[in-house]
Image: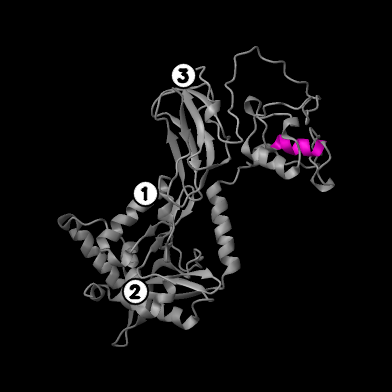
């Protein structure tokens, strides 16, 4: 019996996903556990495996399509079964390729047809192509299909628009036009054109909106990390005996940040500016942690971080980072943050300007540890380990003095970590 495969919903906040790549094609044999296709949300990537065995009877979307969650993506069943009944509205199933003698290759100078000889009754087209035809006001039944398995794709609609004269002169796309000759062409082997990944587009859009819509200002300071380093050494020496996680300096900083943000005078930094006349103040700290992954920057959230122990924060950070790097994190865990920490200290960065993750009002950058000198109480010069902090605030919500006071309190708490634990 034919079984449809739907686009999974990864998190309650996700309405659709991008179909990234097909691992099987129509007509292929499928075993339970075989990879069918990969897909992306706006933040993470996932893979869908087959739950049943059989033959891939039909696919309803092509790579790059934005597919609504819980909609049929393909059908698995016995060879010869009809899968048309499972097709989503406005979508036709891709037919299996039939074995046939190889067709004669077209001559090099033969033009590519943009308009079909006659309107087709049943059009096999991608959703993107149908949307393009609706926008252009052209009859998609007249488009000459060049996609896989005789499918009409977006470029076919563009060619049809040009052929029927509906494109403005500056938008016309000549069909099979010869590329102009360049006097000094760059050798093809000298570069590689790569399609921008969906997550990179989302990061670009978010960061551009952040910088263009906020009044961002960065404040820099540093603190004596001697006590923090000493405390971390004590933990490392006892972690096996006490059953502790491998707590890092970053974990210690996250712990202190979560406690400092809960001080009443710093509520503007533990907030979201929703635009207009609304600011959302959080009763607990939902701490975002910037994580570098092969796909790009992700910021998972430690919810209610101020209510969690140092060991719990450490374990959760490691778990979230692993999910992010494995492209398996629930998108709901990438939302809802009230404040973010971005640590570049391990890369030797002495100071930087972290960009706020909207709609948050602030972000803390953690810099590297550097040896500095200062005057001791006896008048001599002493060397100590200094760690830099870079705080970016939205000046629409937070003025310079409150931002500076937060950094001052944070420095006091970081330099007196063991005292903070007594609270």
Q: Position of residue 259 (x, y in %)?
A: 32, 72
Q: Is residue 117 above or below residue 183?
A: above
Residue placed most toward the observer, 112 or 355: 112
Side of 190 where 48 appears, left or right: left
Q: Are marks 3 and 2 in contact (CB under 8 Å)?
A: no
Mark 2 residue element = loop
Q: Is residue 159 magenta?
A: yes
- CA neighbours of label 2 inside 10 A, class few (<14), some (14 to 19), many (20+): some
Mark closest to the chain's N terminus, 3 or 2: 3
Spatial CA span between label 1 and label 3: 39 Å
Q: Position of residue 420 (x, y in %)?
A: 26, 74
- CA neighbours of label 3 inside 10 A, class few (<14), some (14 to 19), many (20+): some
Spatial CA span between label 1 and label 2: 28 Å
Mark closest to the chain's N terminus, 1 or 2: 2
Residue placed most toward the observer, 388 or 269: 269
Image quarter in which the N terminus is found: top left
**Which color scheme does this rendered protein use?**
one colour
Magenta residues, as a range? Answer: 155-163
Q: Is residue 282 magenta?
A: no
Side of 230 where 401 appears, left or right: right
Residue denoted by label 2: 262
Which quadrant would residue 162 be assigned to in this image? top right
Residue denoted by label 3: 78
The answer to whether residue 23 of the structure is visible from this angle is no
Magenta portion: prevailing SS class: helix
Mark 3 residue element = loop
Which quadrant would residue 276 be assigned to in this image? bottom right
Which quadrant would residue 125 be assigned to in this image? top right
Mark 1 residue element = helix
Mark closest to the chain's N terminus, 1 or 3: 3
- Mark whose residue sits in front, 1 or 2: 2
- CA neighbours of label 1 inside 10 A, class few (<14), some (14 to 19), many (20+): some
């Amino acid at each position: 019996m034919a079984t449809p495969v739907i686009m999974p919903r990864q998190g309650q906040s996700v309405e659709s996903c991008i179909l990234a790549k097909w691992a099987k094609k129509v007509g292929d044999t499928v075993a339970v556990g075989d990879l069918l296709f990969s897909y992306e949300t706006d933040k993470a990537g996932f893979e869908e495996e087959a739950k049943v065995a059989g033959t891939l009877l039909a696919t309803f979307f092509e790579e790059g399509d934005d597919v609504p969650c819980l909609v049929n993506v393909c059908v698995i069943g016995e060879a010869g079964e009809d899968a048309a009944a499972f097709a989503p509205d406005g979508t036709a199933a891709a037919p299996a390729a039939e074995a046939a003698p190889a067709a004669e290759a077209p001559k090099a100078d033969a033009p590519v047809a943009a308009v079909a000889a006659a309107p087709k009754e049943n059009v096999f087209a991608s959703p993107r192509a149908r949307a393009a035809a609706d926008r252009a006001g052209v009859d998609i039944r007249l488009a000459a299909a060049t996609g896989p398995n005789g499918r009409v794709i977006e470029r076919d609609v563009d060619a049809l628009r040009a052929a029927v004269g509906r494109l403005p002169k500056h938008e016309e796309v000549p069909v099979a036009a010869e590329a102009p000759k360049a006097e000094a062409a760059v050798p093809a082997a000298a570069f590689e054109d790569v399609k921008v990944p969906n997550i990179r587009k989302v990061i670009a859009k978010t960061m551009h909106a952040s910088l263009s819509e906020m009044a961002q200002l960065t404040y820099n300071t540093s603190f004596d990390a001697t006590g923090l380093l000493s405390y971390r050494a004590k933990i490392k020496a006892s972690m096996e005996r006490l059953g502790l996680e491998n707590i890092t300096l970053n974990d210690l900083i996250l712990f202190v940040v979560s406690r400092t943000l809960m001080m009443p005078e710093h509520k503007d930094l533990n907030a979201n500016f929703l635009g207009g006349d609304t600011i959302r103040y959080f009763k607990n700290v939902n701490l975002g942690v910037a994580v570098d992954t092969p796909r790009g920057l992700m910021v998972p959230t430690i919810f209610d971080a101020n209510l969690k122990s140092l060991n719990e924060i450490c374990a959760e950070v490691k778990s979230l980072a692993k999910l992010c790097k494995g492209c398996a994190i629930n998108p709901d865990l990438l939302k809802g943050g009230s404040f973010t920490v971005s640590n570049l200290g391990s890369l030797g960065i002495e100071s930087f300007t972290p960009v706020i993750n909207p709609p948050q009002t602030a972000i803390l950058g953690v810099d590297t540890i550097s040896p500095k000198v200062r005057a001791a109480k006896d008048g001599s010069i002493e060397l100590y380990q200094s760690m830099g902090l870079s705080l970016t605030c939205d000046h629409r919500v937070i003025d310079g003095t409150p931002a500076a006071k937060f950094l001052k309190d944070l420095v006091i708490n970081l330099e007196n970590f063991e005292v903070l634990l007594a609270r």
